[in-house]
Amino acid sequence: MIINFTLNHQFVSVDTDPSRRLLDVLRQDFNLVGVKEGCGEGECGACSVLINHQVVNSCLIPLGNVHNSEILTIEGYK
């Protein structure tokens, strides 16, 4: 499935399983290693990103949930 979203101010498209965790897609597909896996349960905040200006734990978000969203990681801050 093709998922479109804005990542760090750039439009991107990913053709992958929509059930993959956002954390894994950011690290593996986009090499954004500022997003870390800590607990994997949404408790520690090491994987925090902004989705549509709200802080979320990317380890809990399936990629399909971010279609047409705006995502900002630590690499996107300038």
Image (cartoon, helix red, strand yellow):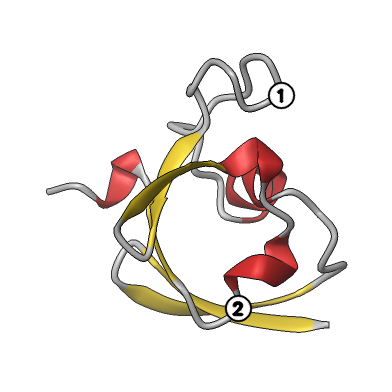
Q: Residues within 10 Å of mark 1 (few under 14, many from 20)?
A: few
For the N terminus, give its image quadrant: bottom right
Rate crowding at label 2 as few (under 14), some (14 to 19) or many (20 or more) other CA atoms within 10 Å. Answer: some
Residue 51 at x, y percent in the picture: 42, 59
Is 3 drawn above or below residue 22 in the view shown? below
Along the horizontal axis of the image, is 31 left or right of 7?
Answer: right
Asked if disc 2 and disc 1 are in contact, CB closer than 8 Å, the reply is no
Question: Along the line of sight, which residue is nearer the eye, 11 or 43?
Answer: 43
Give x and y (percent) for residue 34: 43, 31
Label 2 sits on what residue type? His
> What's the mark number on residue 67?
2
Residue drawn at point x = 70 percent, y = 62 percent: 63
Q: Which residue is mark 1?
A: 41
- Of the numbered discs 2 and 1, the one sitting upstream in the chain is 1
Nearer to me, 60 or 77:
60
| Residue 68: x %, y % from top left | 52, 83
Of 15 and 54, which appears nearest the observer?
Answer: 54
In front of the other: 23 or 39: 39
The image quadrant of residue 75 is top left
Disc 1 marks a residue whose amino acid type is Glu
Label 1 element class = loop
Say if 77 sits above or below 19 in the image: above
Answer above or below: position of 39 versus 13.
above
Q: Under tag 2, what secondary structure?
A: loop
In percent of the image, x 58 and y 43: which residue is there? 58
